[in-house]
Every structure is written in C-alpha cells, then in structure tokens.
Amino acid sequence: MSPSNELNTVLDMIRKRAAEVRKTTDDERLSYERIMANLSIDDDITTSRVGANGVPAEWISAPESAPDRVILYLHGGGYVIGSVRTHRALTAHLARAARSRILAIDYRLAPEFPFPAPVEDAVSSYQWLLAQGISPTKIVIAGDSSGGGLVVATLVALKNVGEPMPGAGVCISPWVDMEATGGSYTSNAEVDPSGSRPRILQLAEIYLDGKNPRAPLASPIHADLAGLPPLLIQVGGIEVLLDDSNMLKAAAEASNVPIEMETWDHMPHVWHHYAPILPEAREAIRKIGEFVLTRT
C-alpha cells in the first residue's frame, strides 16, 4: 500500500527537529516538549495528575474508556527526555481505541537517575494499580522506543519479584539492545530521518552510567522471557531500530511467549506520535486497541 500524502509532512517535521542544535540535556527536553505540544488532542479527552507510589503520573481518559481497563504507558525518549506531556496525543488516541484509561508515568530520567531507576518506577506504578483494586488481567503495559524496551524489562522485573502478570504488553518501535548490534543500523541508516547508531550508543552510555549493557533489565533481549504475557510489537520499516524488534521477537519465541509483530512499510520511528495528522498512525493505534481489547 502506498503511504499517505501526510507522511511527507511528518517526515519533514522529524528532519527539522533532528537538525536542531541542542547543546545540553535541558535543551533536548525543552525542544521535545515544544514540538510535541503542537499535536492537539480532542476536547473530550480528560487528564488528571496523580501519584502512583510516589511516581508522578497522569490519567488520560476518553468517553469510551472503561474504568476497570488500564494501560500503564511508558513514554519513550532514550531514558533521557520525554514525559507524559510529549506523548499526550498518542495516549489520548490510545485511550479511545482501546476503550481504556491510560496511566502514563513520568519515570525518573538519566543522567540524573540512570539505570535501573526507570524500571523501579514502572514496577512501583504497576504495584500501585494493583493496590487500587485493578485486576492484573485488565492491565496492559505499553510503551514506545526506550519505553517499549522498558515494557519488557518491567515485565521481567515483575516476574522476578513474584507479581502477577498483566494481560499483555505492547512495544512500539522498542529499543531493547544497549549495544546497538542490529544490522538495520546500517541498512536503514540512509532512510531513517532521526535515528543513528552513534546517537543510540550515546544514549545507552548516559542511561547505563557504567553498568553492563547486557544487563537483562537494560537490554531485555538478554533476559529470561519465559512466563511473560502475550506481546504485540509494531515497528516502522525505515527505522534503524528495526532489528531490535526482530531480535525481541526471536527471544520471545525462543521462550514460548505468544508474540505478534507488525512491520509497517515506509513508517519512521514511533509514527504513532502523529495520530492527529497521519492516517497510518491512527490505523496502527486502532490495531493496538483491538489487541488490548482481546486480551483484557
């Protein structure tokens, strides 16, 4: 299928941000916040701040959201940038498509709080949901990019401490290999408008702060995935991170974890961000909604 006309607009937006000169981490964070703030959400979407075991978080709901179905959402940004605000357009569309409330969390970021702080915050937030009386079978953990890798790491960490598994996990363009070994870093280097192996390795160095890049909760392709709930991966065909998804799928299959993977031709990294303007983003989120509804 040919890509939509709107895709060129989105690719231009991504290239423009990638070309900006940002000297500090604060510059990176402010730039991301400013650009993502331009993506609108519908008037009937409601948001409210909450603390989830001390982790700052936000509830996002649509009129269709069932009160007992929850998606714990873990934003992307290389564990260095991003927030519930940068991902509000995405989570607002997801709340409607999945007929779920979204609990999006502002987990701690590197370099101030390196690995494993984000994993600890995601686990604490999930435990908070259980303490609110939400059944684990009605929870899905979802995230994009670093947040997609954090989904898998959180599931492994929850298994390790004996918590009940949620109904499913959703990984959008996941980053699951801190060593950036995938061949797509080379094969897609000329077509990915935002990602590169040097940038990924730079983010990994900041996040790991000297720790082992093969630590299972940092690079979950090296974790024991046995016993995890069903997973859905969506990844763009032009991403340098494409092979991270392929490696995650292979690791899950080797551990007999039910997994579905969709590779979307022509799509860039986390194209779901652009749901207000991009038809392919809305369709991808619609399919995530179907996956969530069949497993909760």
Image (spheres, rainbow, N blue to C red):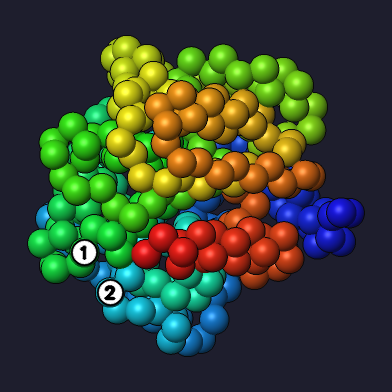
The residue indicated by pointer 2 is 68
**Extreme residue toward the front, this view:** 256
Q: How far across and how far down the image is residue 220, in percent?
A: 38, 27
Residue visible at 19% across and 48% down?
164
Q: Quadrant of residue 239?
A: top right
The residue type indicated by label 1 comes to Ser
Residue nearest the observer in this picture, 252 or 247 = 252
Could one spot residue 161 in this view of the protein? Answer: yes
Q: How far across and how far down the image is residue 271, in percent?
A: 65, 52
Q: Viewed as shown, does residue 124 lie left or right of 30?
A: left
Please say if 241 is above or below 264: above
The residue indicated by pointer 1 is 135
Residue visible at 79% across and 27% down?
190
Please say if 193 is above or below 286: above
Judged from the image, the secondary structure of the residue bearing numbered disc 1 is loop
Q: Are marks 2 and 1 in contact (CB under 8 Å)?
A: yes
Q: Quadrant of residue 197?
A: top right
Q: How far across and how far down the image is residue 87, in percent?
A: 48, 58
Q: How far across and how far down the image is residue 247, in percent?
A: 54, 25
Pick the quarter of the image with the N terminus: bottom right
Could one spot residue 207 in this view of the protein? Answer: no
Residue nearest the observer in this picture, 2 or 228 = 228
Residue visible at 56% across and 15% down?
181
